[in-house]
Image: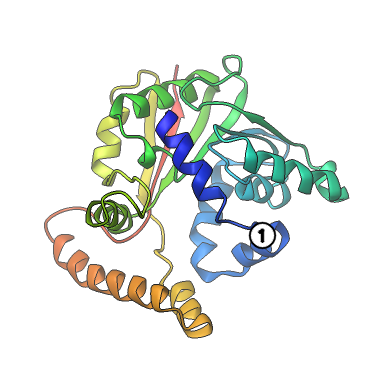
């Protein structure tokens, strides 16, 4: 996990969060409708939610402001948490919406057993180099969940994670960030190693071609244009692969219930 923390410390330095802008952008984006609907099935008003690996806490703000939940955000890197705390301190609305943050490792959660109504994980476990760390993180989520409550995992599509792995290989690790390519079926098999968790729903979310095309048109970025071309090619490949296997183009989600 030390390597993961080091990589994210560098990655967060390149990000300048705008919480209000990002919040309304997510609500208005057609690409976000399915994910908002998915979260709304399992996250309710006044519940206590753990956002495991929250980074700057954009999802904490979403879960609090949109779903009216009480949210605890935890991340192994402290710097982005300070930015979130500064935002919360200056925003009167957020002060009353119960968002708490703490530094910590998702493979060693500093919480008691059976206290959260849901645990969310957005784009986290694919950065772990060791599959054993993924299993430990899943066991920790199971431990802190109430019986009958849900763990919601969303990770990037196989094409995106493969791209990052390819960039690192081609540049000798100078560019890109480590991602382990997963498929939905591999993730489901991993969960079989965690006693007390049962998959209740799995599937795919919209990739976001609409938002990506808008970015290319507005910013006229060569980088975004290459990214669009890459995923357009993957879209063709994915059509052929789906005939014999799983979906490799769209983000993956799993919803898991704690049964014991």
User: How many C-alpha atoms fall within 10 Å of the one at disc 1: few (<14), some, or many (≥20)?
Assistant: some
Q: Residue furthest left?
A: 244
Q: Position of residue 161 (x, y in %)?
A: 31, 52
Q: Position of residue 51 (x, y in %)?
A: 58, 37
Q: Which residue is mark 1?
A: 23
Q: Position of residue 151 (x, y in %)?
A: 48, 34
Q: Position of residue 49 (x, y in %)?
A: 63, 34
* Left or right, residue 128 beside residue 32: left
Q: How many marks?
A: 1
Q: Is residue 206 above or below residue 148?
A: below
Q: Quadrant of the N terminus?
A: top left
Q: Quadrant of residue 230?
A: bottom left
Residue at 20% x, 68% y is 239
Q: Quadrant of residue 52?
A: top right
Q: Is residue 252 above or below residue 148?
A: below
Front residue of 63/255: it is 63
């Amino acid at each position: 996990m030390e390597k993961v923390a080091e990589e994210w410390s560098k990655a967060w330095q390149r990000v300048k969060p705008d919480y209000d802008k990002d919040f309304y952008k997510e609500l208005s984006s057609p690409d976000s409708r399915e994910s908002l609907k998915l979260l709304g099935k399992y996250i309710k008003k006044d519940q206590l939610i753990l956002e495991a690996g929250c980074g700057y806490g954009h999802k904490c703000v979403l879960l609090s402001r949109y779903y009216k939940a009480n949210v605890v955000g935890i991340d192994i890197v402290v710097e982005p948490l300070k930015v979130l705390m500064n935002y919360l301190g200056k925003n009167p609305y957020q002060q009353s919406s119960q968002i708490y943050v703490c530094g910590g490792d998702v493979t060693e959660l500093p919480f008691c057993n059976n206290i959260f109504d849901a645990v969310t994980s957005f784009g986290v476990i694919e950065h772990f180099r060791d599959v054993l760390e993924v299993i430990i993180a899943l066991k920790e989520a199971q431990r802190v969940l109430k019986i009958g409550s849900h763990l919601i995992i969303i990770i990037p599509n196989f094409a995106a994670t493969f791209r990052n792995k390819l960039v690192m290989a081609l540049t000798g690790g100078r560019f890109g960030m480590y991602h382990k390519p997963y498929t939905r079926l591999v993730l489901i098999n991993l969960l079989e190693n965690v006693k007390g968790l049962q998959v209740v729903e799995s599937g795919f979310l919209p990739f976001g071609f609409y938002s990506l095309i808008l970015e290319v048109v507005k910013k006229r970025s060569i980088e975004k244009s290459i990214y669009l071309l890459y995923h357009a090619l993957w879209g063709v490949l994915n059509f052929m692969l789906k005939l014999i296997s799983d979906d490799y183009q769209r983000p993956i989600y799993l919803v898991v219930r704690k049964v014991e």
